[in-house]
Image: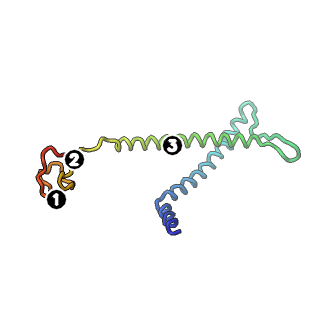
Amino acid sequence: MKKFLKEFKEFISKGNVMDLAVGVIIGGAFSSIVTSLTDNIIKPLINCVGGAEIQGKIHLVGDNYIDYGAFLSAVINFIIMAFIIFCLVKAVNKALSLTHIKEDAPPAAPTTKICPFCKSEIPIDAVKCCHCTSDIPDNTEE
């Protein structure tokens, strides 16, 4: 149980949870903006074109009905949100790929070698081992 609590504390302290919480809050606020855009701007524009009625309902028996207008609004909301998320992910991936180019640079030339006698790490241009004081042959480079 202590290990579980320790892992949970590490998870919380990494900051990922706070980033996730901020993302959820911003996503909720952004979702309400997209819903408002759909309900207050896109639906009235569609209703004006050709006399279409997106706010319609199909009445069934009694008070039951199928609200296809709300369904179409939800579909439009989903398409807008999916497009925006796609654009954001694409931009983040592009930014990450630009930083990875710098990290994929060829490795630098080695600056150390191993002493053939004591197996200690020594500078590459050393002629005598600083650990065992043996003379290092010229052709030894690990």
Horizontal arrangement in the rendering, residue 119 relative to residue 96 (left or right): left
Q: Name the residue at 76% across, 40% down.
A: 68
Tell me residue 117's x, y (percent): 17, 54
Q: Which mark is residue 131?
A: 1
Residue at the spot x=20%, y=49% of the render? Answer: 113
How far separated are the C-alphas under marks 2 and 1?
A: 16 Å
Place of residue 56 in the rendered image (x, y in percent of width and height, measured from the top left)? 78, 40
Q: Nearer the viewer, residue 11 or 16?
A: 11
Q: Which mark is residue 121?
A: none
Counting from the top left corner in percent of width and height, residue 129 is at 14, 55
* Residue 142 numbered mark, or none: 2
Q: Earlier in the sequence, mark 3 or mark 1?
A: 3
Answer above or below: position of 5 versus 111. Answer: below
Front residue of this view, candidates 9 and 139: 139
Residue drawn at the location 74% of the way across and 30% of the way down: 50
**Callout 1 amino acid:** His
Tell me the residue that label 3 is attached to.
89
71 on left or right of 119: right
Q: CA distance from mark 3 to mark 1?
A: 53 Å
Q: Amino acid at mark 3?
A: Val
Few, some or many C-alpha atoms within 10 Å of disc 3 (few <14, some 14-19, many ≥20)?
few
Q: Quadrant of residue 121?
A: bottom left
Amino acid type of the residue that numbered disc 2 sits on in the rendered structure: Glu
Q: Residue lying farthest right?
A: 62
Give the residue at the far bottom of this rendering: 2
